[in-house]
């Protein structure tokens, strides 16, 4: 894993502050030097002693400490590392950063730094979706900060929604991606990702659907955008928020999904993560099908839907890299191998969905199939799967650079 050599970690006040300790542990295990600033709010949740025992160095927490200023002034502190990471970043610090307020050590260092700044927000879901926070995030992005999107889940307050800080392992993946080929290994590349289920109408109120939540496809779209790609996400009906930095189009059925993909072409990368229904009613009923008293069964006549992946793989506007998924309940690898060939895609991510596994879950276990071979990844969070895939995609395009340029880049 390629990571910056040193990180200035600013820990602000949040229930997620404890996750910063795990983050420090993971960074240190990779040989990264971690210098920390613990804000007043952060110190209400974790102690400087706990932080220092993991970093092995002093934890800075007071702007006006004369001793600190003699040891290392706040300006020097802001430049000490290769990048500045604010994790967790509370709503308060995001607001102060976007307004340029410098009223304590953390905000002063953030204003003074000349290093890349990355924030990993953590807050209640209502606070995260508040227009004021959305404004602050847009401003921070416009100022050049990178944002690690919070995730969805149960909150400490008992509510449910988007606002949980990304897991430390995902933050590590993000940092790795940032430092591997510079900030944006996929800048200049266009990507299209399909995600979520399609719903094929039976009549005006009923449809054929499946259990896809969109978690995997959305995470891939987001990871591609983080890597600098211009991403269009075509999503079936899901309850997830649209990922930031991605153009999202909402569709319902397979036909509409294909139309949207065609409209988004040309692209360099296509990832078909959507669970597209294989069958649809040839002619959906125009009126709600009535329950006939006498009839004990109803037969629906179905025809195949359009195959989006195969259509894109064989189109004249075929993206340079076409990636599909295979969701299999049995004979995972033989079926996946056959599917990769049948759909003419470059890579295929096989996942076993026996008993409904993977659909809606937070984790996935992937085997990546390509003409070069097969590699089984360990079970991991869907965001980590997305980052692993994006690292592979970035590597693929880096290899395709003219030899002279690759040599020049490495020199
Ligand atoms: O959304 P989550 O809850 O996070 O779950 C993730 C997932 C299980 C949906 C995802 O990881 C996954 O496996 N997506 C593909 C599901 C699927 O439809 O698999 P398939 O084996 O039936 O299809 C193979 C490939 O062809 C897929 O890339 C699919 O998008 C594509 N396809 C299928 C049918 C069709 N008519 N058009 C297609 O493009």
Image (cartoon, grey):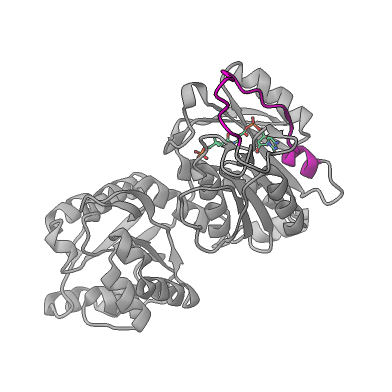
Q: Nearer the viewer, residue 411 or 342?
A: 342
Q: Quadrant of the C terminus?
A: bottom right
Query: Quick check: is 291 in the magenta stretch?
Result: yes
Q: Nearer the viewer, residue 244 or 381?
A: 244
Name the residue at 58% across, 46% down: 195
Q: Nearer the viewer, residue 225 or 62?
A: 225
In the rendered view, does 264 fall on the left or right side of 10?
right
Name the residue at 57% across, 36% down: 209
Image quadrant assignment for residue 363: top left
Q: Position of residue 353 (x, y in %)?
A: 52, 26
Instruction: Report the image quarter containing ligand 1.
Output: top right
Name the residue at 67% across, 55% down: 191
Magenta segment, prevailing SS (helix, strand or loop)? loop
Query: Quick check: is 163 in the magenta stretch?
Result: no
Range of the magenta residues? 289-313
Q: Position of residue 238 (x, y in %)?
A: 50, 48
Q: Position of residue 72 (x, y in %)?
A: 23, 74
In the rendered view, does 406 fall on the left or right side of 376?
right
């Amino acid at each position: 894993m390629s990571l910056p050599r040193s990180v200035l970690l600013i820990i602000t006040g949040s229930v997620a502050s404890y996750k910063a300790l795990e983050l420090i542990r993971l960074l240190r295990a990779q040989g990264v030097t971690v210098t920390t600033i613990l804000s007043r709010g952060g110190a209400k949740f974790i102690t400087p002693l706990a932080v220092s025992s993991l970093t092995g160095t002093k934890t800075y927490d007071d702007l006006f400490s004369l001793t600190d200023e003699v040891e290392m002034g706040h300006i020097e502190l802001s430049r000490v590392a290769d990048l500045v990471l604010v994790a967790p970043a509370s709503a308060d610090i995001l607001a102060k950063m976007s307004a340029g307020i410098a009223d304590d050590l953390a905000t002063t260092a953030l204003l003074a730094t000349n290093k890349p700044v990355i924030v990993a927000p953590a807050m209640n879901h209502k606070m995260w979706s508040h227009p004021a926070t959305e404004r602050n995030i847009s401003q921070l992005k416009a100022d050049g900060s990178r944002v690690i999107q919070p995730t969805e889940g149960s909150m400490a307050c008992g509510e449910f929604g988007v606002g949980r800080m990304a897991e430390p392992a995902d933050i590590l993946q993000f940092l790795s991606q940032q430092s591997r080929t510079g900030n944006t290994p996929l800048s200049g590349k266009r990507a299209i990702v399909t995600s979520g289920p399609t719903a094929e109408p039976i009549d005006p109120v009923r449809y054929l659907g499946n259990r896809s939540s969109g978690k995997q496809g959305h995470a891939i779209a987001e990871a591609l955008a983080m890597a600098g790609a211009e991403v269009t996400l075509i999503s079936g009906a899901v309850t997830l928020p649209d990922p930031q930095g991605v153009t999202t189009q909402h569709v319902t059925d397979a036909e509409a999904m294909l139309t949207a993909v065609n409209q988004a072409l040309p692209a360099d990368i296509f990832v078909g993560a959507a669970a597209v229904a294989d069958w649809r009613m040839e002619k959906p009923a125009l009126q709600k099908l009535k329950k006939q008293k006498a009839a004990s069964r109803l037969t629906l006549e179905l025809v195949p839907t359009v195959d989006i992946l195969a259509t894109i793989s064989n189109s004249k506007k075929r993206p340079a890299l076409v990636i599909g998924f295979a969701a299999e309940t049995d004979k995972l690898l033989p079926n996946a191998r056959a599917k990769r060939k049948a759909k003419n895609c470059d890579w295929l991510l096989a996942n076993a969905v026996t008993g409904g596994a993977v659909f809606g879950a937070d984790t996935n276990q992937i085997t990546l199939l390509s003409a070069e071979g097969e590699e089984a990844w360990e079970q991991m969070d869907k965001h980590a799967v997305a980052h692993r895939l994006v690292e592979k995609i970035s590597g693929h395009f880096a290899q395709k650079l003219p030899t002279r340029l690759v040599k020049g880049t490495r020199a």
